[in-house]
Image: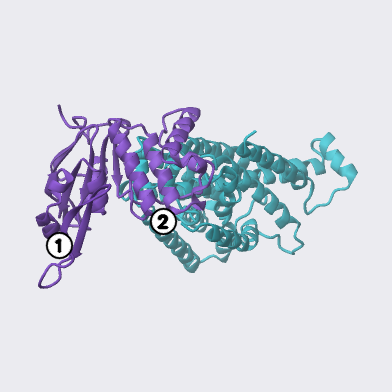
Chain colours: A purple, B cyan
Amino acid sequence: MTAFLTMWDADASLGGRAVLDGTDVLVEAGELVAVVGPNGAGKSSLIRAFAGLLPLSGGVVRLQGDDVTTLSLRARAARVAYLPQEGRIAWNLPAIEVAALGAPFLSGADAMSAARTALEEVEAGHLADRGVAEMSGGERARVLLARALTTGAQALLADEPTAGLDPEAQLMVMERLRARAAAGQAVLVSLHDLALAARFADRIVVLDAGRVVADAAPLAALTPEVMAGTFGLAARWIDGPDGPLLSSGRYSIGSPTGA
Amino acid sequence: MTRPSRLTLMLAGLIMVASIPGILLGETVFDMAQTSQAFVEPGSGPAEVLWQVRAPRVATALMVGVALGLSGAVMQGLLRNPLADPGVLGISASAALAAAAAIVLGAAAAPGAVEIAALVGAGLAGSLLILFSTRVRSPEALILFGVAVSSFAGAATALIFNLSPSPIATAEVMGWLLGSVQNRSWVDVAWVTPAVLVAGALAVLAAPGLRMLSLGEETAGTSGLPMARLRLLALAATALATGAAVAVAGVIGFVGLAAPHLVRSAVRGDPGRLLLPSALAGGLMLVVADLLARMTPTDQELKLGVFTALVGAPLFALIAWRAAREWRL
């Protein structure tokens, strides 16, 4: 069986800097894969390449076996929903209408009912009629996640969906993405929070300068060697009540601290 | 009835109400008998004034306002920027430059030449913007490019003044640049109306794209909608509407900027549903502004463009200030 999302030997650069460098990534249906890496490692580029937004100079991205560049815009949108990191909404639209933009090809009533379901899924049903300019950052993030869920696409691409959210909202977002994977969707998410990645992902892909440094189950991917080499952290995992906890510190000159 | 359609009906009603004094009142004051003569006796003096001078003037003001209100709504949606309008993007300035060039080159004597020049100018600026927007996606870059187009057109127009040997031609260009619907005939209305209607149809086709662009270029680009085509339609609508407006009435600023703001909260920000109310609000603004400009007791009739700028700019500053306070994202 071919994976739902496939990136094979992808190369891409932005402003002369390689952001993808012989990158291979697979995501199966029903799987939540987290992409982690330091700033500038190529996480967003990887997500954008799957969304068809980043032209590759080499390699290929396939959605359900079809090259993303050969799919029509509409067919592409039916296969992947993209939740960008930038969460600005230009006008003070009510939440329900923002969420309904996930379904531009449905009739108005059907789009509204899909939007309402999605808002309830992200615990934002009560915000449906509120303007997004009158919301907190966390509330707006929920609404934008609901928009991505409204698409009904078979795969979800989320670029740092927890950035700027309070801890409770971060957990809510990850739980929703987890639930979508459990329901059979392929979910690819970039994260900065390694503990969150370790707790919710089936698999972690560690990127460094566009290269895949590790690709395995969370604790197998985030080994002390990877933590040191890629993140510059002296770290180890300890067992916590809800999953593995990361104990880490910066490498200072001389000896590792905090581990 | 939903709030936007109530608003649309209300605006249409207000336009009709404002048109009545627009037709009945003017420089020449008629008594009751003369006014009723205008209604029952075609060909009489009062009838000529009401139906051949004032009515086409009101209709022209309406269509120009509709064109500018529509252009402003389309531009703001397209660029996700509440300060965008055809003036900012240099479409108006380019149309005015072409018109000024036509006047100075002596083409004003040929009927329709100045109008055609203005349309061509707007079309050229619109095409430039379209070309630019197909290569560069960023709305900020498009605005900067538009500002450059606008500055260049302004500078070139100043150059024409500078080099023009004839003070008469210079005065004529000045008159054009100030913007007016004085002495417009049914012939003007007859050609500007279809242009504005076609622009409106193009804008309506582009509306789903404008709505999707609320979420940003990248989300819109992955929404499945054919964004490149919708963006082109929107730009074409703006170029056509603005070109027609400048061709028939010269440069009238502020309406395209302000009309969308007046109705945006009633459509709850939706850039698609904004189009019709914004167009009607623009039409209403110009019908009223033209009436007020006409009735202001000055020796020289106030030019409509001067009037809208004088009244509109402070009002717009107020709107912008209030919007900025509400809009903390």
Query: For the residue labelled by badge 2, is the local secondary structure a helix, a strand or a loop?
Result: helix
Label 2: which residue? B143
Same chain shared by disc 2 and disc 1: no
* A238 over B199 or under it: above or below: below
* A189 over A252 or under it: above or below: above
* B194 over A245 or under it: above or below: above
Residue B51 locus on image (x, y percent) = 74, 40
The image quadrant where one finds the N terminus of chain A is top left
Local packing at callout 1 (Cα closer than 10 Å; few below 14, some 14-19, many 20+) is many
Q: Nearer the viewer, residue B270 or A128?
A: A128
What kind of residue is marked 2?
Ile
Label 1: which residue? A234
Residue A71's image quarter?
top left
On the question of residue B104 being in view, the answer is: yes
Q: Nearer the viewer, residue B90 or A234?
A: A234
On the question of residue B111 being in view, the answer is: no
Distance from Cα at disc 2 to Cα at disc 1: 47 Å
Q: What residue occupies the far bottom of the structure in this picture? A: A253
Chain letter of disc 2 in the image: B
The image quadrant where one finds the C terminus of chain A is bottom left
Marks 2 and 1 close (CB-CB < 8 Å)? no
Residue B148 locus on image (x, y percent) = 40, 60
Query: For the residue labelled by badge 1, is the local secondary structure a helix, a strand or a loop?
Result: strand
What kind of residue is marked 1?
Ala
